Image: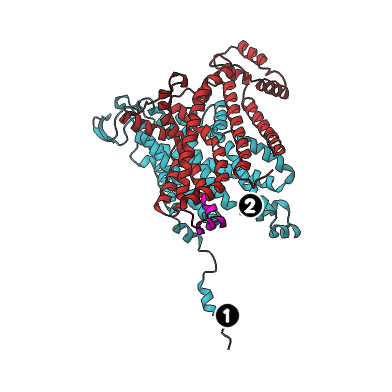
Amino acid sequence: MSTVADPAPIGVLERVPATRPGTVRRITRNRSIIIGGAMLALVALVGGLAPLLGTVDPAQVEPALRNKRPGQVVTSLNADGTRTERTLWMGTDSLGRDVYSRVVYGARVSLAVGVTVALLSAAIGLVIGVVSGYVRALDTIVMRVMDGLMSIPGILLAIGLVSLSRAGLRTVIIAIVIPEVPRVVRLVRSVVLSIREEPYVEAAVALGARTPALLVRHVVPNTVAPLIVQATFVCASAILIEATWSFLGVGIPPATPTWGNIMAEGRTLFRVFPHNILFPGILLAVTVLAVNMLGDGLRDMLDPKTRKQV
Amino acid sequence: MLSYVARRILATIPVMAVVAVVVFSLLRLTTGDPAAIIAGDNATSQDVAAIRTKLGLDRPLPQQFAIWIASVARGDFGESFFFKKPVSHLIAERLQPTLALATCTLILAVSMAVPLGVIAAWRRGTWLDRGVMGLSVLGFSVPTFVIGYVLIYLVAIQFGWLPVQGYQRLEDGFGGFIQRLVLPSFTLAAVYVALIARITRASVLEVMNADHVRTARAKGLADVSVMLRHVLRNAAVPIVTIIGLGIALLIGGVVVTESVYAIPGLGRLTVDAVLARDYPTVQAVILLFSFVYVFINLLVDLTYTLLDPRIRY
């Protein structure tokens, strides 16, 4: 009877899970994703349900209600002689617009900008990155152009772009996308460069797969995970940049309720009425924090290598 | 080494060329007539025609580009349409506040972020680590101008410890100069600290697992001297790299911070120029900032050999 080399009973081996825990488990176990996702969902819900949350028209100017402090209760006389009482949860600005309503509606603009910029940058960056990584002839030229674009501090390049055309939501989105694209291109390209040498890609080539099909079926799927993570961070930075521009007065026109615009309006009377900057500032910070946490969590989940270091 | 330096400097030329083309085309890519845009809304058609000839806008594009590059190389950025003086003078006037702010911020950020990152790595997994990393995520998320206003409100308005806004030139007394720089520097440093602390922690953690660190520990060296002599030195390259790359954040932040604190520097000039649609100034500032960014990262690349003797070129 041998006492060494006795293979472990099959039953023991089977108890070790053969695969990684399922996606759902991995998401629910990740605190960053849960907290960030929940906060973000809340902001999205607030923006989406804005008309139902006791708001008034965010652009409505009421000279009688200028510069009210948060929590103040006002009564207004209706056309039919009845009176309605209204609490100004976040006060009013110097034109008498309700800050609470403006902040709630502002969530829409911020999220729209963030999500649109993230999707556009990811899509454009993916196409350029895959082509540049796979087609050697184009690689050098494309990457030099990307290097050049990346050497212009993003916010300045975008400011330059905005300054050229009349500011508006579309201009702002385009102007944020252009500096973000090179970062995505670099990421995608680096993934493509490592994937193209993999045996299964060579095998597909040997089996006669045509380049477009090869890219779509074997290369692009590998870029999805890092792309999702990058897109989240792009979204966070887009929200910040949009707010910064509105704040500086070079972004979306002041009549549109965006968090940056509300804060810009509150600048002059900041010493007396800090609430105009405080409330949108907090919401902005919470939203960006949520997106960043979501991104950190997703990176930990999708890329086990960096989890050990960062 | 010398040939590496030369090659590295040559490598910045295509990058700067792309930057120049982008900055040049900013104005030409617009829908409409650049001369009309420059002339402004109240210009007569004679004004527009005069500007067109003056700037050579009636010539072919490559020729325009050549003329523009040649004058930029001579330090001539044209005349500001809004401020009515040469852009180069305008930049020279605005240089000091921005340099002062950037230098203060850089010193402040590095001297805060590196120790924070090291402590987080050293006490990995404890509440200290989580605290530092939490602050770092927060630093990325709270916009610069919100930090600025919160600091102004608390420190300057509620407690009255420091002046609210403004700038005092260095020539007019050092005390007032530094007093007015404290709040802006802290404001601008926040995001930079977040970035550097994060990379420092990651880099230090990686080195802490290395064999030579275990040896140093095993021979009984104290934690502090292991950290300073064996870990930090080896972790320096990524940290210095991120300090260089972070200059982009710093430049973006300068624009915002100078607006919040009413500092008459290049950042404020950028915003004013954009609002006034003063394109020669906008072009010059973007070009200048990009050049600074590329140059600093060139310096960073060259310091690698000093930091890590194993890197040879």
Residue underneath mark 2:
A220
Residue underneath mark 1:
A7
Query: Quick one: SS at disc 1?
Result: loop
B283, above or below A147, in the image: above
Q: Is residue B218 magenta?
A: yes
Q: Residue at x 52, y 44 (%)?
A: A233
Q: Residue at x 54, y 69 (%)?
A: A18
Assign the magenta stretch its main secondary structure.
helix
Query: Quick one: SS at disc 2?
Result: helix
Tell me where residue A14 appears, x and y as whole percent.
53, 74
Tell me where residue A159 appears, x and y as whole percent.
54, 29
Label 2 in the same subunit as label 1: yes
The chain letter corresponding to cyan is: A
Q: Is residue A274 left or right of residue B6?
A: left
Q: Is residue A98 visible?
A: no
What stretch of residues is rendered in magenta?
B203-219
